[in-house]
């Protein structure tokens, strides 16, 4: 299962290794909160609607049974690679990426062992997660409407 199509505000809520060298990520769909005044320190930014995870939010679990490497970045510092196509989905497969090059250079993992390497990129409101693995992740909705 892929994430549903359409614009979603995803929030990373959990990341961890349920067993050795496996990876589990949980993301929740943020919804627009109530209109309220927003301040940044002493600066009044006017009114806005915060993005919040509520009891109505859908939650999705993304699992890799095995990975070669993964990295988590603060979304505020993310930048696109020059040849990188625009991300259309929150979870996408990347080809010829700098992260895949880094993993290929700094490990002995290659397309022969453990097998053809794939780079998966997950983009949320505040995190960017990159995973190199042989198999694609399993994605399922675990909470919310329609689960």
Image (cartoon, rainbow, N blue to C red):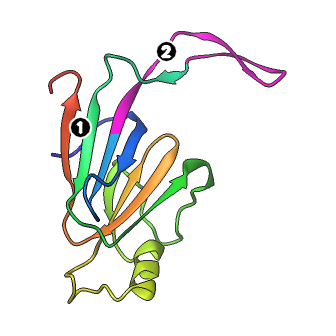
Whether pointer 1 and pointer 2 mark residues with C-beta atoms closer than 8 Å, the reply is no
Secondary structure mainly formed by the magenta segment: strand
| Rendered image quadrant of residue 56 | top left
Direction from residue 146 to residue 70 in the image, left or right: right
Work out whether 79 lies above or below 37: below
Where in the figure is residue 140, as x and y percent of width and height?
A: 18, 41
Residue at 47 percent of width and 80 percent of height = 102
Label whose residue precedes the other's in the sequence (1 or 2) = 1
Work out how far the residue at label 1 is from the one at label 2, CA to CA, in angstroms: 21 Å
Q: Residues within 10 Å of mark 2 (few under 14, many from 20)?
A: few
Q: Residues within 10 Å of mark 1 (few under 14, many from 20)?
A: few
Work out whether 139 lies above or below 57: below
Where in the figure is residue 69, as x and y percent of width and height?
A: 37, 70
Using the image as rendered, state which of residue 121 and residue 54 is in the foreground: 54
Say which element carries label 2: loop
| Rendered image quadrant of residue 8 | top left
Mark 1, residue position: 4
Where in the figure is residue 132, as x and y percent of width and height?
A: 33, 69
Residue at 31 percent of width and 85 percent of height = 109
Work out whether 7 lies above or below 110: above
Mark 2, residue position: 33
Q: Report if residue 64 lies within the magenta region.
A: no
Residue at 38 percent of width and 77 percent of height = 96
Using the image as rendered, state which of residue 61 and residue 122 is in the foreground: 61
Q: Nearer the viewer, mark 1 or mark 2?
A: 2
| Rendered image quadrant of residue 68 | bottom left
| Magenta-tinted stretch | 27-49
Residue at 35 percent of width and 38 percent of height = 27
Direction from residue 67 to residue 126 in the image, left or right: right
Using the image as rendered, state which of residue 133 and residue 79 is in the foreground: 133
Say which element carries label 1: loop
């Amino acid at each position: 299962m892929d994430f549903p199509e359409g614009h979603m505000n995803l929030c990373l809520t959990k990341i961890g290794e349920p067993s050795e060298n496996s990876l589990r990520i949980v993301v929740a769909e943020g919804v627009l909160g109530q209109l309220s005044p927003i301040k940044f320190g002493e600066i009044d930014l006017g009114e806005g609607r915060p993005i919040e995870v509520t009891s109505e939010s859908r939650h999705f679990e993304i699992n890799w049974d095995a990975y070669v490497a993964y990295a988590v970045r603060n979304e505020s510092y993310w930048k696109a690679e020059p040849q990188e196509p625009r991300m259309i989905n929150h979870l996408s497969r990347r080809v010829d990426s700098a992260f895949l090059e880094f993993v290929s250079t700094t490990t002995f993992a290659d397309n022969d062992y453990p097998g053809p390497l794939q780079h998966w990129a997950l983009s949320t409101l505040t995190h960017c997660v990159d995973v190199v693995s042989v198999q694609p992740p399993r994605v399922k909705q675990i909470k919310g409407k329609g689960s």
